[in-house]
Amino acid sequence: MTPPRIAPWSARTPISRRTLLTAGAITATALAAGCSRSSSSRSENTIKVAYQKTSSFHQLHDLLEKVKPEFEAANKGITIELVPIEAEQDQYFTKLALMNGSPSTAPDVIYEDTFQIRSDAAAGYLLAIDDYAKAWADWDAQYLDTAKEAGLGDDGKLYGIPMTTDTRGIYFNKTIFSQAGLAADWQPTTWEDILTAARAIKSAAPDVTPLNIFVGKAAGEATTMQGFEMLLYGTSSTLYDDAAKKWITGSKGFVDSLTFMKTVYSEGLGPSLDVALDATVGSKMSTELIPQGKVAIAIDGSWLPGTWMSKENAWPEWEQTIGLAKMPTQTGQKPGFTSMSGGWTLAVGSQSANPQAAFDLIAMALNRDNALKYATESSGITLRKDVAEDEAYLSYNPSFEFFSSLVEHTHFRPTTPDYSQISSNIQVACESVASGQATPEQAAATYDEALISLVGKDAVQAANG
């Protein structure tokens, strides 16, 4: 198995408009105070590691707890301080921005979403690590050039070492499908096939939520990426014209994607709005509602089986219960299927008093054995060539083969620093339609207005269709 190509920007959740404003104010304050990496308030002997931890995502915490004593034993006098940020994704970015705003609290090592690399590097939060990476033998020997691009900033410098990538598809409960008279090897070929199955489930199993597709602002990038973009990139439309370097307005695919969401929620095929619009909806789906058989179909990411294989959220029956299907294009048009890919990095904070030790910790955390542990336990698609060829990796999770096969159909988000703010506007559009506050056409028009206000008229162009 060859590690897949990944784009420079990939991940699960963007920072909100509120967070961006907060982070901007913090950065301005820090710059005004003349902060520098040589701050006397920091110790060269303590490496602070900030990362996300939730009930459904603890695999990185498990890895770092293993690496901490190993690193301390090999580097006498250095202490690793683990700082798990127990929050869902949007809140994680908010808290991380607050930490980065002060030299005394800024982490030495940061769990960094790849789509945040460019904006965080530009904000001065991250340290360029090209020289450290060149001295690490594994960097050239085990990582493909396309994988290396994931950690690049706008200036072409390297700011993060990629950990894994992912893809997205459709999970379905075969037991519930049987009750509804649906095939155990179900593979929809159009959006209408998905809706038809959901309607059949609603009729046959009224106590079950037929379909989950993320639509709420509180779900952050899960709404944009697992929800909206999984639809949009199955149409003939796109968000951004790479060749012209312009954002697209007035696209039919944008309206059609919102219309699909409207259909799901107006027909009662999705979860109740108190669930759908809750900030914990992602964790609740993966750790409770899907394992408990309360959701029949879920459009979600390749990492879910890792959650079900963990001790905290063990669901041994998932292999027999869950079926996997590719996300079809809107009408079955070529190439037939679509997916979205993301990923995360480990980065060195710009305020670190000992960046060499910080990078050495990253190198240890992502060596062959530890990368294998993390990729298997988190259900990540590995980016190391040696791990990709390891039988222990290939045989660990029966979903790896399926989700790796989606790479040929996958898409990546626009590689612009303003993407996170644009993503927030997409989430507003999705929620307004799902909650009945706007029609798809109205929500799309509001998005277009916000887009032009954000990037300017010269940075947009009207869709061809």
Image (cartoon, rainbow, N blue to C red):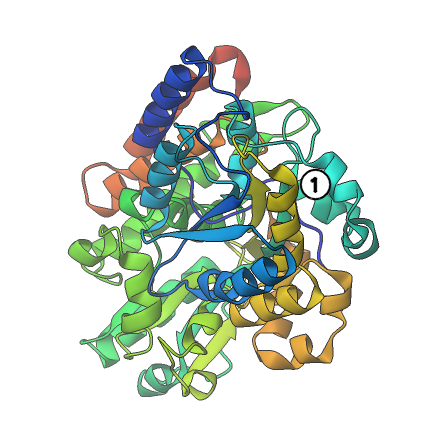
Left or right of residue 21, residue 100 in this image: right
Q: Is residue 442 visible?
A: yes
Q: Position of residue 40 (x, y in %)?
A: 48, 26
Seen in the picture, residue 76 relative to 184 is either above or below; the reply is above
- Which quadrant would the N terminus be assigned to in this image? bottom right
Left or right of residue 318, residue 388 in this image: right
State the residue in front, 303 or 217: 303
* Image point (38%, 66%), residue name: 298
Q: Position of residue 66 (x, y in %)?
A: 53, 67
Residue highlighted by disc 1: 149
* Image point (38%, 57%), residue name: 53
State the residue in front, 139 or 238: 139
- Residue neighbourhood size for the residue with mark 1, other residues' Cα within 10 Å, grouped as few (<14), some (14–19), many (≥20): many
Which residue type does callout 1 highlight? Glu
Q: Position of residue 328 (x, y in %)?
A: 53, 60
Numbered marks: total = 1
Within the image, what quadrant is residue 206 found in? bottom left
Q: Position of residue 245 (x, y in %)?
A: 62, 23
Q: Is residue 449 visible?
A: no
* Image point (28%, 31%), residue name: 442
Seen in the picture, residue 290 relative to 446 is either above or below; the reply is below
State the residue in front, 193 or 453: 453
Seen in the picture, residue 391 relative to 11 is either above or below; the reply is below
* Image point (40%, 83%), residue name: 174
Callout 1: SS: helix
